Structure formats: C-alpha cells, structure tokens
Amino acid sequence: MADIEKCTLGGSQEPLRKESLATLSATAVDEPRSPPPSMLSTETIFPDGGARAWLTVLGAFLALFCTFGQLNSFGTFQTWYAEHQLHHLPPSTIAWIGSLQLWVFFFSGAFVGRLFDAYGPRPIMVVGSLVLVLGTMLTSISTQYYQYILAQGILVGVGIGTVFYPSLAAISTHFRQYRGTALGIAIAGSGVGGVTWPIMYQQLFGRLGFAWTVRITAFVTLVLCLFAILAVSSNLSSPAQSAPWLDTKMFRDVSFMLVVVGSILICLGLFIPFFYIVDYTTAHGISPQMGFYVLSVMNAGGILGRLLPPFMSDSLGKFNILVPCAFLSGLSILVFWPFTTNLVTIMLFAAVYGFFSGAFNALIIPCIVQISDIREIGTRVGILYSIISFPALCGGPAAGAILKADHGSYLGMMLLAGIAVVAGSLFLLWARFTLSSRSSERV
C-alpha cells in the first residue's frame, strides 16, 4: 500500500499503470488487509488520496447536498401543498408525490449503475443535472396534482438518481483503505442538505412565494451540480463497455444476496420514523413548529452518523461497524421510541436514531464495494437500490395502515419498524460471517 501511495503523492494525475497479479500478491504480503484478487481488477491502482480523489469527494458531497438533501426535505413541500395549491386533497394523496420521487430515485439505480460501469460518471451526471433542474423549474410553475406528480415526482426523482449514483460510485474507484471515510464525507452532504433546504424553504416561501423559491432552488442546484460534474472523476483506466447489462453471477454470490435480503428488511422499517416523527410529536401535545425541529435533529444526528462510523470502519472493518449500527437502529425503535413522551426524550430518540440510521446509509455502499469487483460496483450498488425501492415505498403506507387500524396508537407501527430493522441486521451479520473464509481483510 505504501508503494502505491508514493506513486500518487501530491495528487498526481498520471494514467493508471497496469499491474500484474504477481505484483498484487506481493503487495498483499506487506498489507495483510488487502482484498482477494477476485475482488480487484488487475489494472486498478487505488491512490487513496491526491487532488483528483479528494476533488471527487467534494463534488460528490455537493451532488448529494442537491439531490438526496432535497429528497429528505419533501416534508416541507407536503405541508405547503396541504395549505395552498393542493389544499383540496387529503395529505395521504399529496404524500404520493414524495413517495413516487423516492421510489423513482431508488429504482433508477440498476440502470444508472450499469451506465456508470459503461461510460463513467461525467456524461451521466450532465444528463442528470439537466433533468433535475428541468424538473425543479417545472415544479415552480405547476398548479395541478398531476403536474406535481410528473415534475417533482418523476423528473426530479430521475434527476436525483442520475446524479447520486455516479458520484458515489466514482469515489470507490479512488479509495480502498480510506473508502469508508471518503464515502462517509460525501454522504454527509445529504444530511447537511436535509437540514439546510427545509430551513431555506420555510424562510423563503413566505417572503418570495412558492414559485420563486423553487426557481432559486433550481439555480443553486445548477451551480452546485456544475461544480460536481467538473470535480467528480473515475479512477478506472477504461469503462467496462463490453460487459453484459445484467450479469446474473451476482445473484449466485451468497454474501451479496444476504446483504440484499438484509437491506430489504431494513428499508421496510428504516424510513418509518422519518415519516411519522413529526406526527408523533404533535400527538403528544407539542407544536408542529417544534415537530419540525425534531426532524431537523434527526437529520443532524444523521450527519454525525455518516461521518464517525465510516471513519471507524476503515480500521475496524466495514461489516463490523455496519452490523451493530443497523441492529441498534432497530433496537432504538423497539426500546426507546415507545417510552418517549415529552420533547426532551423525543429529541434524544431523534438524535440517536438519526445517528445509527445515518451510519447504515453511509456504510451499505462500502460493504457492497468490498465484496464486488471494482468494475461492477455501479451495477451492484444500482441493483441493490432498485430492489430496496419496493420496501422503501411500502414501509410508510404499511405503517400508516397499522396506525389507522390501531386507532391512533403508534405501538404497532413501532413494532413493524423495529422488528424489520433488527431482522435485517441479522442477515447482514450472516453475510459478515460468510466473508471470514474469503478474505484476510477486516470485514
């Protein structure tokens, strides 16, 4: 590893040098935590630093600030629509705009991931940025429900996906030893956006009106995405254009499939607290304004969760940190949330849950990268996100149905969310044990 770092000291942008399997094996003797040859391309050198690598991290941070950060802020639009343009519709109908946006974002992963493997990040991010800005501008002039569905639900969802996935996948081509830290810094951009955008919307909706606030969002997004496009780069010497669009061997990889099953269960319950924490807060006699700050605290906890656990995972192992964080996310729902009855305890739960759920969001991609060939990471990450789009879409409505059936009691909804996340963490633990015999690297 030290030899590789010397070659890239000062952020050298030399083209990648081909390296034989024999050289990789010799390096593995000096660095006992190197992954097995099957997980690495023989032509790929990971600089683990340098100007190009850290510019990619910065660009991805800004990309996630604009994309996933805005996606996390839909609750502000939900409240505005319910009081203004779509006041004649029930909240559950309005919520489908945000749910569709979330599903389109997740489901687009398989297609966008394969495009990344074939063409690299930049062409995809150019298209995605244009679609995202177009969808945002069209949202600013929409007046009918179907227009919001098309503009904000579908177009913005597609734009988010086509900027989000390439920027994160590109980071993994630059880093190996510090991959968790690099991805964690980038993914923290979504948490910062999740705190910043709602505050901006609340301040500007009343002063400038809805249309101009959303247009300003589009202009800011355009500028930040332009910088992200220029900053994000791939470290691969040549894209994998000849590979099949759907390589079925990933579905025969036991470790990968266990991660997929675990993620399905986790995502069934993971977003439920984000959907219902404000309603839960107001149900306990706390003002809706304070309920908004509870959600901000949850997102703020997620920022720390996206930074500290990934940093620890670089030395302790990706799965070794992911599994307990996922388990504690579910456990906090089961043993902490039901006993929160005032603002202080609800705030504490929000911070704790935000931290551990943020850690899952930050670590799942490094774990997938660890068990994949570097030239397949776009496809594998995309397939995972496409699959979990369905439980992510169904979790909120399922929780709402339970809440209605229980006549306003939140206990059944909490049991669904907590049990699903805990069960999913056990499948991740199973996947971690399957890796023990495959690699000398800390998992």
Image: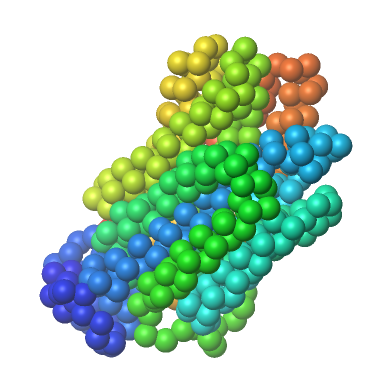
Q: Position of residue 382 (x, y in %)?
A: 57, 64
Q: Can you say whether 324 is above or below 404 in the image?
A: below
Q: Nearer the viewer, residue 246 or 308?
A: 308
Q: Residue at x 62, y 39 (%)?
A: 206
Q: Quadrant of residue 411?
A: top right
Q: Residue sitting at 45 percent across and 16 percent down?
A: 344
Q: Is residue 54 visible?
A: yes
The residue shown at (21%, 75%) is 11
Question: Residue 145 location in percent, x, y?
Answer: 83, 50
Name the side, left or right, on which 344 lies relative to 76.
left
- The answer to whether 376 appears left or right of 338 in the picture is left
Depth check, front residue: 90 or 277: 90
Colour scheme in the image? rainbow
Q: Position of residue 324 (x, y in %)?
A: 40, 37
Q: Is 160 placed above or below 1 here?
A: above
Which quarter of the picture shows residue 108? Answer: bottom right
Residue 89 x, y percent position in the rendering: 85, 38
Outermost residue on the right side: it is 88
Horizontal arrangement in the rendering, residue 56 relative to residue 194 (left or right)? left
